[in-house]
């Protein structure tokens, strides 16, 4: 070194290190928790490198909460154990709504409240992962403990630190001097499958489910190995809290959000058990959108004072119950296995089943995802199998039951040729999927058209699967764009289709020719481009022309999109055949609205909202943001031009100035539930 640093200089460096640390923590939170970064990866890397450099030169300033310290040393021997200051209990289960209602009645009996009291509940998805307790002292993550036997947990701090959604240091204001935060560590389904593929290719044993995979990864002796497995977290509870007072679950979850945690999604605070059940049904419906596995909801008393009064039993609290969605597994026999060609040419094995009722629905087909899985699960024609159905997802075969074989079961061979067009199938690198390379493959065309007409794309009614199949088989439709060239007489060639029906279908098609850019992009059925990705692309490229002339690098630079999507989109829009087919649609009168107009034409376009009272499910700021996002406006006072007055909880008051004024001016008055509905559809 050229010269010895002066104490003032050293002090400056310490300050810079502290500042960098805070900045990086903030950007980690924006990126991992909010999915909304405000600096580029390059800028982030610069900050990170600078911090690392300084810390290497001045190791005396390294602190355990530094973002550079997420990956620590290998763990020697066993994980040390520590007692939980408050035991981590399990939850009572309910398997029917009657049992949920009984839980509500029991609470009121216990508290000596009249049975018509509406208790406030928090209704949350039950995450099927590994429970964890995170202990923070003066903002810093001090220890992470597994549930263990409920009384003592294992210290897995080193591994937990690798999880990017867990703050090493609490952000924000009003931070308690000490807090035990409880939540769940899980592995996203996609990462689970990837991990299993890797393990298999290394000749190792795959994990049975994401939960086991998360548990195994959390207890890996090498944190750098844990880091590679991309675990994620959500939090939903607490142990001891010191320094501030929190009165309800609602308040806890809001605060946890502000301190930088990823909080349990889709939770809702409701009044009365009826509304709790309603939200339970909602969660069951959207289950498949969660990246974690969930098999039920947890219903908890919102108010902490009431919780205190209710207390705990030996193994579970009295103030919460886990409602498990109805059993969705059954055994049946595989009658046949066939190969099905999807919209992008993927060939998937599908089992034809002896029909079996699962959760009220008759199931006669189940997917096996891909041929590797078919082999791994060793499903044979004639086998007895366990079938699972969850939400609206296609039923799947969990496993075969070889114990029930009689000897005449037949193994299904992976096909070499496409069952629809006879082309030789191929397996792209790093993929398990088998694909048909023929862009004009009739099976692919049928699937692409079905997708294009579907509700969230062009939303054209009247053309079902059978119809489309015949149109393709008779070569009336040879390209997706041909839909817009259909004539009445083409349709009237089919048995049972008269002029009236044909006219109606053609009208349906014509009425839907104007389409927002994002829906159009989704309708194209590009691989890896679902609704969310289509929206991001529309937002970035604004117009159809902009989108069609995008290059791979530009697409990849869209936040949230990776190289896989970029490659797939670039390939699609460069393909002559696709370009022509889009041109033909436009010539037929399809009009693609630019993104800006799409936003303006949002559901709430031109509508003005005013709020009064307290909202339960979100803050007023959040409500405002959502209205604006959908093209509406929010003002502070009610006037004749107000379209809706949203009335939240008036906290004992019977009316407000705004409410009176709205009544006088006959402004439409809606409840929070009605408001949420408006936002949703
Ligand atoms: P059990 O082990 O089946 O009795 O259920 C209790 C466990 O459910 C807790 O230890 C948590 O790990 C887990 N859990 C998952 N999601 C939640 C949630 N939203 N609220 C409370 N506990 C949850
Ligand atoms: Zn084919």
Image (spheres, rainbow, N blue to C red):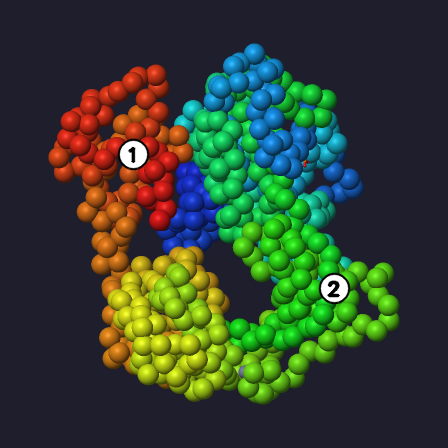
Q: Residue at x 53, y 14 (%)?
A: 113
Task: Please give left or right for residue 674 compared with residue 177 in the image.
Answer: left
Bin the neighbour count of mark 1 within 10 Å (Cα to Cα): few under 14, some 14-19, many 20 and up. Answer: some
Q: Position of residue 614 (x, y in %)?
A: 34, 26
| Residue 405: mark | none
The answer to whether residue 631 is above or below residue 406 is above
Q: Position of residue 175 (x, y in %)?
A: 46, 26
Say which quarter of the image contains residue 538. bottom left
Q: Is residue 92 visible?
A: yes
Give the secondary structure at mark 1: strand
Q: Earlier in the sequence, mark 1 or mark 2?
A: 2
Please, which residue is most extreme toward the top here?
A: 112
Q: Label 1: which residue?
A: 670
Task: Please give left or right for residue 589 compared with residue 242 in the image.
Answer: left
Q: Is mark 1 within 8 Å of ligand 1?
A: no
Quadrant of ligand 2: it is bottom right
Q: Label 2: which residue?
A: 333
Q: State the residue in front, 478 or 154.
A: 478
The answer to whether residue 666 is above or below residue 444 is above
Bin the neighbour count of mark 2 within 10 Å (Cα to Cα): few under 14, some 14-19, many 20 and up. Answer: many
Give the secondary structure at mark 2: strand
Q: Residue at x 24, y 21 (%)?
A: 656
Task: Please give left or right for residue 648 compared with residue 278 in the image.
Answer: left
Q: Position of residue 439 (x, y in %)?
A: 47, 83
The answer to whether residue 16 is above or below residue 427 is above
| Label 1 with label 2: CB-CB less than 8 Å | no
Q: Residue at x 72, y 67 (%)?
A: 334
Q: Residue at x 47, y 22 (%)?
A: 118
């Amino acid at each position: 070194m050229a010269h010895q640093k002066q104490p003032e200089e050293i002090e400056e460096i310490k300050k810079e290190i502290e500042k960098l640390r805070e900045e990086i923590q903030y950007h980690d939170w924006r990126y991992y928790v909010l999915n909304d970064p405000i600096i580029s990866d390059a800028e982030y890397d610069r900050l990170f490198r600078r911090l690392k450099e300084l810390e290497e030169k001045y190791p005396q300033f390294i602190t355990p909460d530094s973002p550079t310290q997420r990956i620590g040393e290998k763990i020697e021997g066993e994980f040390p154990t520590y007692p939980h200051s408050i035991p981590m209990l399990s939850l009572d289960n309910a398997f029917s709504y009657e049992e949920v209602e009984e839980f509500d009645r029991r609470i009121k009996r216990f508290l000596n409240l009249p049975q018509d009291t509406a208790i406030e509940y928090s209704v949350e998805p039950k995450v099927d992962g590994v429970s964890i307790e995170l202990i923070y002292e003066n903002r810093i993550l001090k220890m992470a403990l597994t549930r263990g036997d409920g009384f003592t947990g294992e210290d897995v701090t080193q591994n937990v630190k690798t999880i990017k959604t867990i703050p090493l240091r609490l952000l924000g204001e009003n931070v308690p001097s000490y807090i035990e935060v409880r939540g769940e560590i899980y592995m996203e389904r996609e990462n689970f499958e990837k991990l299993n593929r890797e393990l298999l290719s290394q000749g190792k044993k795959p994990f049975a489910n994401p939960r086991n995979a998360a548990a195994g990864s959390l207890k890996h002796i090498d944190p750098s190995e844990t880091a590679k497995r991309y675990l994620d977290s959500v939090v939903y509870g607490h142990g001891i809290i010191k320094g501030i007072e929190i009165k309800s679950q609602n308040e806890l979850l809001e605060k946890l959000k502000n301190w930088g945690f990823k909080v349990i999604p889709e939770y809702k605070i409701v009044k009365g058990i009826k509304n709790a059940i309603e939200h339970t049904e909602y969660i069951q419906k959207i289950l498949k959108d969660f990246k974690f596995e969930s098999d039920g909801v947890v219903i908890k008393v919102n108010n902490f004072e009431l919780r205190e009064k209710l207390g705990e039993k030996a193994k579970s609290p009295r103030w919460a119950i886990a409602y498990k969605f109805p059993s969705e597994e059954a055994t049946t026999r595989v009658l046949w296995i066939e190969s099905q060609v999807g919209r992008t040419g993927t060939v998937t094995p599908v089992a034809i089943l002896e029909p079996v009722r699962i959760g009220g629905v008759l199931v006669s087909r189940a997917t096996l995802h891909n041929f590797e899985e078919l082999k791994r699960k060793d499903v044979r024609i004639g086998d007895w199998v366990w079938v699972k159905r969850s939400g609206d997802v296609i039923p799947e075969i969990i496993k075969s039951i070889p114990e029930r074989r009689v000897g005449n079961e037949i193994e299904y061979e992976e096909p070499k040729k496409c069952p629809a067009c006879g082309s030789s199938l191929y397996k792209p690198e790093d993929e398990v999927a088998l694909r048909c390379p023929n862009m004009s493959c009739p099976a692919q065309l049928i699937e692409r058209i079905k997708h294009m007409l579907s509700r969230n794309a062009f939303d054209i009614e009247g053309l079902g699967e059978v119809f489309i199949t015949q149109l393709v088989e008779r070569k009336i439709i040879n390209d997706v764009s041909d839909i817009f060239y259909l004539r009445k007489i083409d349709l009237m060639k089919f048995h049972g289709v008269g002029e009236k029906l044909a006219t109606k279908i053609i009208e349906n098609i014509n009425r839907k020719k104007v389409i927002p850019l994002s829906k159009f992009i989704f309708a194209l059925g590009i691989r890896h481009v679902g609704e969310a990705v289509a929206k991001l692309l529309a937002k970035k490229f604004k117009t159809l022309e902009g989108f069609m002339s995008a290059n791979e690098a530009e697409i990849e630079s869209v936040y949230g999109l990776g190289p896989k999507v970029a490659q797939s989109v670039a390939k699609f829009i460069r393909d002559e055949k696709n370009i022509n087919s889009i041109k033909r649609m436009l010539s037929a009168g399809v009009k693609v609205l630019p993104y800006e107009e799409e936003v303006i034409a949002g559901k709430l376009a031109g509508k003005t909202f005013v709020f009064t009272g307290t909202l339960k499910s979100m803050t007023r700021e959040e409500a405002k943001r959502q209205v604006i996002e959908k093209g509406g406006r929010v003002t502070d006072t009610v006037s004749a031009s107000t379209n809706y007055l949203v009335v939240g909880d008036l906290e004992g008051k019977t009316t407000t100035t705004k409410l009176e004024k709205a009544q006088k001016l006959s402004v439409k008055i809606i409840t929070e539930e009605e408001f949420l509905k408006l936002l949703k559809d």
